[in-house]
Amino acid sequence: MIPKALHAFCLIVRRGSLAGAALDLNLSQPAVSRLISNLEKEVGFQLFQRDRRTLRPTEEARLFYRDVERILAGLEQLSGIAEDIRQGAGRKVRVVALTRLANSILPIATKEFREHMPDVGVVIETHHRREMERWLTGHHFDVGFGPLPVEQMQLDIRPLGSKSAVAVLGPDHPLRQNDAISVDDLINEPLISLTPDTLLQQQINAIFSEAGKTPRPVLSTSSSLVAANLASQGLGYTITDPFTAFSISRPATVRKITPEFSMKYGVLTPAGAVSLPTTDLFVECMIRAFEEFGGTL
């Protein structure tokens, strides 16, 4: 498939018009139309439906777009990879990290790394869990740090460590007197839940189920940090990881939860990648930062 046709396809999906894509590509509209027509013949299905002056992607096109965008992003990085090779391997460490780790322990690890290797650059990419696995398959990176389990088979995975979940409530909540908060303590409290497809919400449901209890959700969000900030406003409680609790924007009650359950994190590297001293050192720094992290408890 011609990269220019794929690029045109992505531009039309994002902009919703042939004219906008043609302008970005510095091509005529008929030329872009021919690219899309040839691409449709190649893939074997219709990509767009015309809706007045806009082009609306078909369901097949939306599915196709997810992977095309990832692959094109990988192609765009080739010049950067070549530049790294020209400068010599190991002069730059490309790191991808879960957002909650990037906002808590990654700066600590990066500081230690730079103290040991001040001449080596660090490029940091951050993503939420759902985006991270897809991103890893199509991008050049040296090491990643994220939640386990990971479904991608093109990765070598080793443990970074695990941390126990915490409950987050408003700063003046009566349960702030407790050293730990149990499921029984929370049963009559309003829950700020995560969307059902998140791993953390599935774990929350499991601990309530095992205790024979049913939580009382009143608010729901796809973001664990948003849930924690809502809880800090006294709107209910949420259960999250200590890294997210560390990033709350205002005072809150943060306590360990019982029964305890842990969230595991891993060190992710491209399958079969040659180990470099720079990457190894960064991993060592990250492991130390992870182990020493105490959060807000």
Image: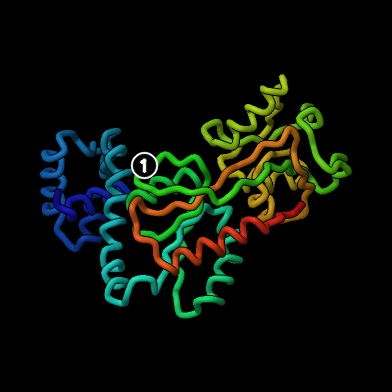
Identify the residue shown where x is 32% and y is 71%. Answer: 84
Classify 156 as above or below 49.
Answer: below
**Residue 115 horizontal/vertical position (percent):** 56, 77
* Image side of residue 153 versus residue 150, left or right: left
Please tell me which residue lies in front, 62 or 297.
Answer: 297
- Toward the bottom, the furthest residue is 119
- Toward the top, the furthest residue is 212
Identify the residue shown where x is 12% and y is 43%. Answer: 37
Please identify the quarter of the rendering in which residue 286 is found: bottom right
Classify 63 as above or below 278.
Answer: above
* Image side of residue 212 versus residue 23, left or right: right
Q: Count every numbered label the image shows and give the total.
A: 1
Classify 214 as above or below 296.
Answer: above
Please tell me which residue lies in front, 234 or 281.
Answer: 281
**Residue 285 horizontal/vertical position (percent):** 56, 64
Please identify the quarter of the rendering in which residue 178 is found: top right
**Residue 224 horizontal/vertical position (percent):** 61, 44
Name the kind of residue labelled 1 in the image: Met
Identify the residue shown where x is 32% and y is 50%. Answer: 70
Identify the residue shown where x is 44% and y is 69%. Answer: 278
Please identify the quarter of the rendering in which residue 141 is found: bottom left
Q: Which color mode does the image show? A: rainbow
Element type where label 1 sits in the image = loop
Tell me the residue that label 1 is attached to. 153
Please tell me which residue lies in front, 39 or 118.
Answer: 118
* Image side of residue 52 versus residue 206, left or right: left
Q: Residues within 10 Å of mark 1 (few under 14, many from 20)?
A: few
**Residue 8 horizontal/vertical position (percent):** 22, 52
